[in-house]
Amino acid sequence: MKAENKSEAPQVLPVPRTKEEAKRFYDKISRAYDYFTGAFERKHAERALECLSINEGEAVLEIGFGSGHCLKRIVQSVGETGKACGIDISAGMLEVTKRRLGKAQLIDRVSLCCGDAAKLPYTDNAFDAIFVSFTLELFDTPEISKVLEEVKRVLRPTGRLGIASMSRESGKSSPLRLYEWAHKKWPRYVDCRPIYLEESLINAGYRIRSKEMTRMVGLPIEIIVATKATSD
């Protein structure tokens, strides 16, 4: 499969805030995070999780688990014979997720970590599946390839990567232009931006297994399941 829109890739906007600023921002909004995402991102994240088709007994990692809604589903899907892990840059999100999983009596069946996805603290070939929703576009463009290389390292040879992301692929819609204007004007608050997800995956050595396009308040969303390009 050939990547499209390569000539347009430089139009992806930068992420000027630092990771320390990101940590402080998400720590600050962690308790109210569900109010910002519940009506918008969650249904698309849940659809991406369905596409990943997690099986009982698998080892699964979620990168950027936020307030823990999808991670809760992952823990339930892998069952008592599986392994569920989550990593997020925000200690505030970690505490919110601990409370959510504790109330569901699932906290003893998951391993949570506060850390950076560009330096995953896991061994090679550790996971059958990795899930990322509305997180990859938070990384500045040069770091996206680093995150995808780390994912490839910890993913087993036949493992699957499922991602939901804001997409720039569909072009120059009015909602996209408005959102990018807001990102340029208030980059520390509107800190993510649309990216070329399929192209980024192909360039990082993945094979696209399935892809869906949808919209979130007019913004294009890509939902992709991919594997390492060397796997069958």
Image (tube, grey):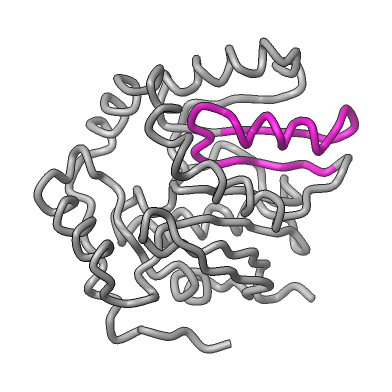
Residue 177 left/right relative to 135: left
Number of numbered discs present? 0
* Residue at horizontal 64 percent and vertical 58 percent from the top: 161
Give the answer, above or below, for where 94 lies relative to 20: above
**Horizontal and vertical percent position of residue 54:** 78, 48
Give the answer, above or below, for where 157 lies relative to 111: below
* Residue at horizontal 23 percent and vertical 51 percent from the top: 15
Q: Nearer the viewer, residue 93 or 47?
A: 47
Residue 86 left/right relative to 33: right
Q: Residue furthest left?
A: 185
Q: Nearer the viewer, residue 183 or 6?
A: 183
* Residue at horizontal 48 percent and vertical 31 percent from the top: 66
Position of the C terminus, as image quadrant, is: bottom right
Is residue 108 one of those drawn in magenta? no
**Horizontal and vertical percent position of residue 30:** 39, 22
Q: Which residues are magenta?
A: 58-86
**Horizontal and vertical percent position of residue 176:** 27, 64
* Residue at horizontal 45 percent and vertical 61 percent from the top: 215
**Horizontal and vertical percent position of residue 170:** 38, 76
Residue 57 left/right relative to 187: right
Q: Nearer the viewer, residue 11 or 42?
A: 42
Give the answer, above or below, for where 44 lies relative to 167: above
Is residue 76 one of those drawn in magenta? yes
Position of the N terminus, as image quadrant, is: bottom right
Q: Nearer the viewer, residue 10 or 213?
A: 213
Give the answer, above or below, for where 26 lies relative to 204: above
